Image (tube, grey):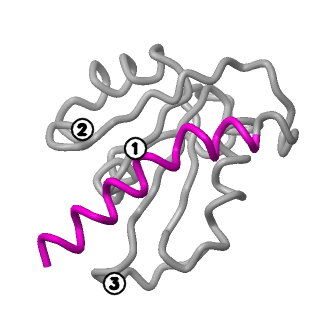
C-alpha cells in the first residue's frame, strides 16, 4: 500500500459489507494508479478490514457500494464523515472478486467523480 501522499494524490476509500468482493476489487483497480492512494474496508465485524474513524479521516473521497453503507457511515461515524464526500455507486452484492462485469461497472461509476475531483483540485491550487 502506497503511503507517500502528495498534494497531487487523492486518497480513495471503497466500502462494502465484508470487504471481500466489491470494495477489494475497486482497491485493486485503482491501487496501481500513481494519482491515488487506495484502501478498502467493510461495514461488518466479520469482514476483512473493518471501517474505522481513522480510515474515514484519511479519505479524500469515500465510495460506498449501496445506500445501506452510506447510512451506516452517517449514523455510526458522523463525526468522521461530517465534511466528507460520500458517493453511492449503487452496485449490489452480485459479483465475485475481479469479475469483469464488476470491474467495468466500478470503472464506469467511479470515473466521473475522479475527473471532477482532479479538475477542482487543480483549479484550487
Task: Give the residue at mark 2.
Answer: 81
Q: Residue at x 58, y 35 (%)?
A: 42
Task: Give the residue at mark 3.
Answer: 6
Check disc 2 and report its element: helix, strand or loop.
Answer: helix
Q: Are marks 1 and 3 in contact (CB under 8 Å)?
A: no
Disc 3 versus disc 2: nearer the observer: 3
x, y (%) of residue 8?
34, 80
Rendered image quadrant of residue 1: bottom right
Rendered image quadrant of residue 86: top left
From this view, report whether residue 32 is shown above or below residue 113: below
Check disc 1 and report its element: helix, strand or loop.
Answer: strand
Q: Is residue 115 left or right of residue 84?
A: right
State how far apart marks 3 and 2 are (Cα). Answer: 22 Å
Q: Are marks 1 and 2 in contact (CB under 8 Å)?
A: yes
x, y (%) of residue 67?
45, 16
Task: Give the residue at mark 1.
Answer: 62
Q: How many marks?
A: 3
From this view, report whether residue 12 is shown above or below residue 92: below
Check disc 3 and report its element: helix, strand or loop.
Answer: loop
Looking at the rendered structure, which numbered label has been put on residue 85?
none
x, y (%) of residue 58?
34, 59
Q: Residue at x 68, y 35 (%)?
A: 105
Mark 1 or 2 closer to N-term?
Answer: 1
Q: Which residues are magenta?
A: 103-125
Q: Is residue 22 left or right of residue 94?
A: left
Amino acid at each position: 500500500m502506497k503511503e507517500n501522499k502528495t498534494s497531487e494524490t487523492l486518497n480513495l476509500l471503497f466500502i462494502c459489507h465484508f470487504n471481500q468482493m466489491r470494495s477489494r476489487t475497486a482497491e485493486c483497480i485503482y491501487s496501481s494508479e500513481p494519482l491515488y492512494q487506495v484502501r478498502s474496508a467493510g461495514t461488518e465485524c466479520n469482514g476483512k478490514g473493518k471501517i474505522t474513524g481513522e480510515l474515514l479521516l484519511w479519505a479524500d473521497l469515500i465510495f460506498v457500494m449501496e445506500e445501506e453503507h452510506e447510512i451506516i457511515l452517517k449514523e455510526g461515524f458522523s463525526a468522521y464523515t461530517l465534511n466528507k464526500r460520500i458517493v453511492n455507486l449503487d452496485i449490489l452484492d452480485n459479483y465475485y472478486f475481479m469479475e469483469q462485469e464488476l470491474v467495468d461497472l466500478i470503472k464506469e461509476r467511479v470515473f466521473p467523480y475522479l475527473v471532477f475531483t482532479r479538475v477542482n483540485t487543480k483549479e484550487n491550487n
